[in-house]
Image (cartoon, rainbow, N blue to C red):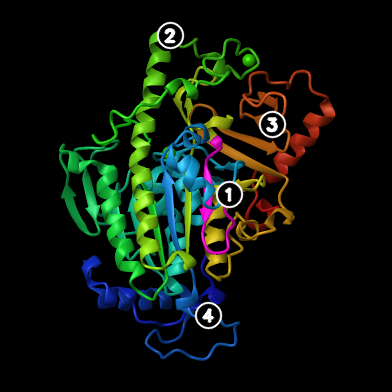
Amino acid sequence: MAGAADCATKVPRRHAADRLPALESSPVNVRIALAGLLATLAGCGGNPAAPPAPSSAPTPPAAAKRPSFVVVVSDDLDVRLFEHLPWLGDEFRRGGVSFPRAYVTTALCAPSRASILTGRYAHNHGVLMTAPPHGGIESFVASGLEADTMATHLKRAGYRTGFVGKYVNGYPRGVAENYKPAGWDYFVAPLEALRPERYFGYWLNDDGDRVEFGEDDGDYLDDVLAARALRFLRAAVAEDDPFLLVVMPYAPHFPMLAPSRHASRWFDERVMQGPSFNETDVRDKPIWVQGNALLSLAEQERALRQQRLRFTSMLATEDLLRDALAVVDRAGRADDTFVVFTSDNGILMGEHRLALRKANNYEEAIRVPLVVRGPGVPAATERPHFALNVDLAPTVLDLAGLPVPDTMDGRSLAPLLKPGGEATPWRQDVMLEYFSSSEGRSIALRTDGWMYHELESGERELYDMRADRYQLDSRHQEAPPELLQSLSERLRSRRDCRGAACRD
Ligand SMILES: [Ca+2]
Ligand SMILES: [Ca+2]
């Protein structure tokens, strides 16, 4: 949480919104006065109206020298589909460093989004599921941690900040329809509480205005979001101030609709069908998996048909990112702008007989694409290091030259983004968790060679990820007890970790 040290780094500055009136709808002066009042209430002390005083703290780089960020987060995009995307999975990916071992600490929308923004595990931010009582927007608001995100830290350092897209599930239930979380100058999000899971016929909090969209081509949600994002970006690149733009499009989330211009694009969905699709023998697996019958022919066909729809919906995200890169390039800002692409979680589309399933610890759900491009980042480079969604906020802060709060559980990926970064000493394993009202909390340890899983039921899974990357044969019954014990001890040492204890 923001503490006294954090307050000391605050530098009064002219608000960027002063020069971007077109994007602002709320009274700037009132908000500045409120910010000062809140800072005083939060224990920072001092007179919010006082002129800047010389600081004895190390001088951070001037605001104009700080890099900018475009962060795009897909919804439910798994690695396999990403690798088959014609541009994102190919040319875009080759433009920077990609992490084939990027994982989300919880493979579900709301928990992962909160983790991306706060740099914390779900067991520390409290958004465990997508709906109350232990999840959704209500839990995120109640946590108070919206005041301690990558956006609030960058905004305090002089950044102009914009969020465009799906926020945390259920938005804006329990808060005002024009609710703008702390840290964002510009905020556009679908009103999921009114009409969830819509590409057409939805309501938007359009930076303070409630706007309804219909069923025409031009109403396609991800295109509307892209237009808002690009509007923010065009204004931001023309300013001296650094900026943070976070875009969370809806694709390829259910109900998987593409804009008409891409709807007929051909895709051989059979490439998405790996050896674990409709797994024949699930006796090695926990009871909750065994309880699923083999997928019928119709169910198999539906899963494949949905893969084609997921593919075509992602082509709109390709358009968005291509356009965003062009805006940054044309403005001459490519040398100080990082572009990050990832997903909030993967998904099972028939693997292990589970269709459209997240909230589990199988590889297709927890592994996500992660690409970082930007100044000094080598192109066409893969880092085998474990990266996590909780690393994104620390990474952005670190690249911005800001201190990373010790309360964040993730660690900065910045050393890995430099030429020669492969030699960086790094974590050797990661702890993953998911929460279910029926199955409780399940925790897993992914090491170089093993995926070890402990369910609240007491059941176990152990996969040899070198010999069995599709997780067809859990070895927990016949594995040497000392191996199980060492994996379990390591896992339990991490299960309730906070801050530094989560990082190595
Ligand atoms: Ca998701
Ligand atoms: Ca099996």
- The question of residue 426 being in magenta is answered with no
Residue 355 quadrant:
top left
Callout 1: SS: loop
Between label 2 and label 1, give the one nearer the viewer: 1
Where does label 2 land, which residue? 296
Task: Answer with the quadrant where ligand 1 appears in the image.
Answer: top left
Between label 4 and label 2, give the one nearer the viewer: 2
Q: Residue at x 27, y 55 (%)?
A: 228
Q: Which mark is residue 8?
A: 4
- Mark closer to the chain start, 4 or 1: 4
- Mark closer to the chain start, 2 or 3: 2
Q: Residue at x 63, y 19 (%)?
A: 472
Q: Residue at x 67, y 37 (%)?
A: 446
Pointer 2: residues within 10 angstroms few (<14), some, or many (20+)? Answer: few
Dot 4 amino acid type: Ala
Where does label 1 land, which residue? 380
- The answer to the question of whether label 3 and label 4 lie on touching residues, with beta carbons closer than 8 A, is no
Dot 3 amino acid type: Tyr
x and y percentages locating residue 55 in the rendered image: 55, 87
Determine if the C-beta at disc 4 is less than 8 A from ligand 1. no
- Mark closer to the chain start, 1 or 3: 1
Q: CA distance from mark 2 to mark 3?
A: 30 Å
- Mark closer to the chain start, 4 or 2: 4
x and y percentages locating residue 19 in the rendered image: 28, 76
x and y percentages locating residue 293 in the rendered image: 49, 10
Task: Kindly tell me whether residue 230 is visible in this rendering.
Answer: yes
Pointer 4: residues within 10 angstroms few (<14), some, or many (20+)? Answer: few
- The answer to the question of whether label 2 and label 1 lie on touching residues, with beta carbons closer than 8 A, is no
- Mark closer to the chain start, 2 or 1: 2
Magenta region = 366-379
Q: Main secondary structure of the magenta part?
A: loop
